[in-house]
Image (tube, rainbow, N blue to C red):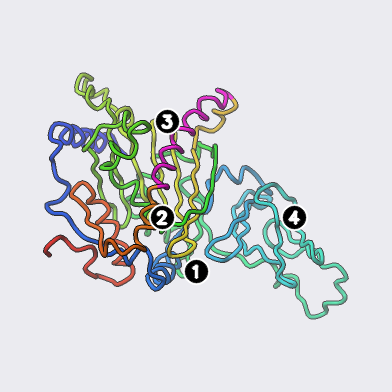
Amino acid sequence: MDRDEELRILDRALAHLHDKRLPLTDADSRVSTDRYQSPDWYRAELDQIFGRLPSMLVHGSELPGPGAFVTMEHFGRPLLVNRDRDGVAHAFLNACRHRGARLEQDPSGVRKHFTCRYHAWRYDTDGSLATIPSAHCFPGVDPAKRGLVALPVVEAYGFVWLMPEAAPGRADLDGFLGSFRHDLADLGLDGFEIYGAESQEWEINWKLVVEGTLEGYHFPFLHTKSANPLFENSTFFFDGFGPHLRSILPKRSINFVERTPREERRLLAVANVIHTIFPNETVLHQSDHFLWITAHPLGPARTLVKLRLIVPRGSVESDGAERWEENRALTYQVQYEDLEIYREIQIGFATGANEEHVLGTQEFALRTFHETVDRHLFGAGPGAQRDGA
């Protein structure tokens, strides 16, 4: 963000510090608990949201050079994400074009080519079919037309994005991000790398994971001994950029920023900045590094949660891993405290205790998020309703 915007945000942070009753909205609101457990709702999300919007597949550092690859499952499709000999990123269906066997078994690595273990059909890193053993047995196969099935990707803002078939290009990605792309570009994530990646499946709805990063109301209670000592209560606020959100979580050090001359004040010295890329990605800026959270839905009540620190490139080798490991341990502890409470909430849905969630004025970003979900599902629908509306 530019300097004027940074100072405006700092002024807003101070306003919330001086008046902790400063509202984010004028009333509380309601969302139905059905949206966290209904199979029909989940299928609509897959079709209307996840099937039609860009997805952040990998950070660029996960493909460090030509031949590097990562495999993953993406909404039931096995993917092979890699760089070709020229360093260009690709995404292919991870399926041999002979009989459909999984082409690459390993989760990551480097290959000069990809060879199917079933009948040894071999493919170059650009997806082209290079070799068919006993090729004379396949007189009707044109190798030029039997390469791996490619999916549209764009590499930008530090990530490789899987694009929808109807909107496959860089202009489509920038249109999706809108003005939020300037914030992402300013993060400079091309100069960073992944550290301490963890993935785990949880019996929770994916939206609970996103919600946990959109309010600070729970910090004094759930994170009493972990994160709460670091952050100032009741000072969270946010801005919307189309479907995306930028949230500010001030630290205790905000109390001393007015002692610093205005021209020397820096937002990241006194706050975390949380970038929520709709629908399910969170990039949390913590001073000189980032936490990247992905909530990948597997079912109405099952989610693959991916946690990754993104640290300055080369800092692990130059400074040692101890610093980052200490940071990772605390950061992930906070996330697992959240995830455990989400698990309890998901169990609570089944009891029927609540037909709706009530969202307070400090949780207004959650309402905004749900209204965005509703717009994608239903068009210009009512979204989450205000109490009494």
Q: Which residue is mark 3?
A: 288
Image quadrant in which the C terminus is located:
bottom left
Which residue is located at x 50 percent, y 48 percent?
Answer: 306
205 lies left or right of 238:
right
Q: Report if residue 247 is visible in the image.
A: yes
Q: Which mark's residue is nearer the viewer, 3 or 2?
A: 2
The disc label shown at residue 258, or none: none
Mark 3 Cα within 10 Å, few/some/many (few <14, many 20+)? few
Q: Which mark's residue is nearer the viewer, 4 or 2?
A: 2
C-alpha separation, residue under disc 3 versus residue under disc 4 = 37 Å
The disc label shown at residue 165, or none: 1
Q: Where does residue 383 sit, x and y in percent of width and height?
A: 24, 65
Q: Is residue 155 magenta?
A: no
Q: Where does residue 170 sit, x and y in percent of width and height?
A: 46, 57
37 lies left or right of 314:
left
Q: Secondary structure at mark 2?
A: loop
Q: Report if residue 267 is visible in the image.
A: no
Q: Secondary structure at mark 1?
A: loop
Q: Where does residue 337 sit, x and y in percent of width and height?
A: 40, 42
Which comes before the other along the chain, label 4 or label 2? 4
Amino acid type for the residue under numbered disc 2: Asn
Q: Which residue is mark 4?
A: 113
C-alpha separation, residue under disc 1 versus residue under disc 4 = 26 Å
Q: Secondary structure at mark 4?
A: strand
Which comes before the other along the chain, label 1 or label 2? 1
C-alpha separation, residue under disc 4 versus residue under disc 2 = 33 Å
Q: Which residue is mark 2?
A: 280
C-alpha separation, residue under disc 1 versus residue under disc 2 = 19 Å
Amino acid type for the residue under numbered disc 1: Glu
Which residue is located at x 43 percent, y 71 percent?
Answer: 43
Say above or below: 59 vs 301: above
